[in-house]
Amino acid sequence: MSSTSGGAGKGGAGKGSKGTGAKGTGAKRTPGRSGGKSTGRDGSLKVHVKTAFKRSHSSTLWLERQLNDPYVAKARAEGWRARAVYKLIEIDERYKLLKPGQKIVDLGAAPGGWAQYASKQVRSVEGKGRDKGRVIGIDLLEIEPLAGVEFTVMDFLEPDAPERLRAMLRSEGGDGLADGVLSDMAANATGHKQTDHIRIVHLAELAAEFAREVLSPGGFFVTKVLQGGTENDVLTLLKRDFATVRHVKPKASRADSAELYVLATGFRGSDTVR
Ligand SMILES: C[S@@+](CC[C@H](N)C(=O)[O-])C[C@H]1O[C@@H](n2cnc3c(N)ncnc32)[C@H](O)[C@@H]1O
């Protein structure tokens, strides 16, 4: 299903489990044996979540982390759909990637934080003429319609996914090319470190392959990887086609997480027949 909408740029938590906060999760904030509030060493108030019937220990920890994460609260207050948006904002502010009029593909876009921010930067809602950009997003999960974002539910691992995305880039008078490809795709964690690492790097490699097929010369590519041994292979692969390739660890990416981003800029152009 494809959706494009033309309303406000921000607001509204997406469907599914990828919102910023804990609304509807049944979080108990009342004190109890394992619930309540305490003051951290830095003086901040920390919410403890009571273990509830049917809630696993890992869900309880996730919920507690969400409730105590300043980026989650900030995202909610500022109307972004995901705390993840601050990772892209930081990368963009540092490397000046997103500009009015650009065509951007967002892989793994749900619930829509990156797409919201990209839409604002490329002016896909209010831009005029050459200043009006486009944001095309896909995910396994549906999202609430987002202003200026052309969204389709799609599994990027399906063989026809790249061609379907190229068709979206050719629609609406497009030339089939993009100025930037963003991938924040992450398969659900299995808990097995090496398996999770291999799955995420596989998604990153496929995203890189797609980027080199659709990017215009000078284009950029951002992808999530996990530290764990083979993330440098993605870097090596990209060095063939991009002037500059680097690892970036934004502050909003949890310090205790192996998550890392690869940023490739200055695409040299493709020899692929488009
Ligand atoms: C960390 S979330 C992305 C958050 C997003 N950047 C935002 O700001 O809202 C990762 C997303 O990747 C999606 N994903 C994982 N594997 C995928 C696949 N094979 N095809 C499409 N999306 C995928 C997940 O469904 C999930 O929504």
Image (tube, rainbow, N blue to C red):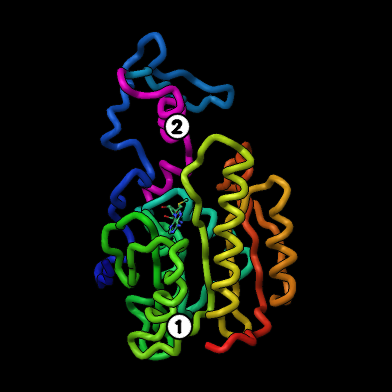
| Secondary structure beneath label 1 | loop
Neighbour tally class for label 2: few under 14, some 14-19, many 20 plus, Cα within 10 Å: few
| Viewer-side residue, 247 vs 213 | 213
- N-terminal of the pair, mark 2 or mark 1, is 2
Q: For this view, does 124 lie left or right of residue 220?
A: left
| Viewer-side residue, 167 vs 96 | 167
Q: Are marks 2 and 1 in contact (CB under 8 Å)?
A: no
Quarter the N terminus occupies: bottom left
Mark 2 or 1, closer to the camera? 2
Residue 210 screen position, x and y as percent: 54, 72
Residue drawn at (30%, 32%), measured in percent from left and top?
A: 25
Circle 1 residue: 101
| Secondary structure beneath label 2 | helix
Circle 2 residue: 62
Q: What residue type is disc 2 on?
A: Trp
Residue drawn at (33%, 60%), measured in percent from left and top?
A: 10
Locate residue 49: give its quadrant.
top left
Q: Is residue 26 magenta?
A: no
Q: Is mark 2 within 8 Å of ligand 1?
A: no
Locate residue 22: give its quadrant.
top left
Residue 177 screen position, x and y as percent: 49, 84
Residue drawn at (74%, 71%), measured in percent from left and top?
A: 239
Q: What residue type is disc 1 on?
A: Gly
Q: Residue furthest top?
A: 33
Q: Is residue 60 magenta?
A: yes
Residue 19 screen position, x and y as percent: 35, 46
> Where on the image, by quarter, is ligand 1?
bottom left
Q: Which residues are magenta?
A: 53-78
| Viewer-side residue, 143 vs 13 | 143
Residue drawn at (35%, 85%), measured in percent from left and top?
A: 171
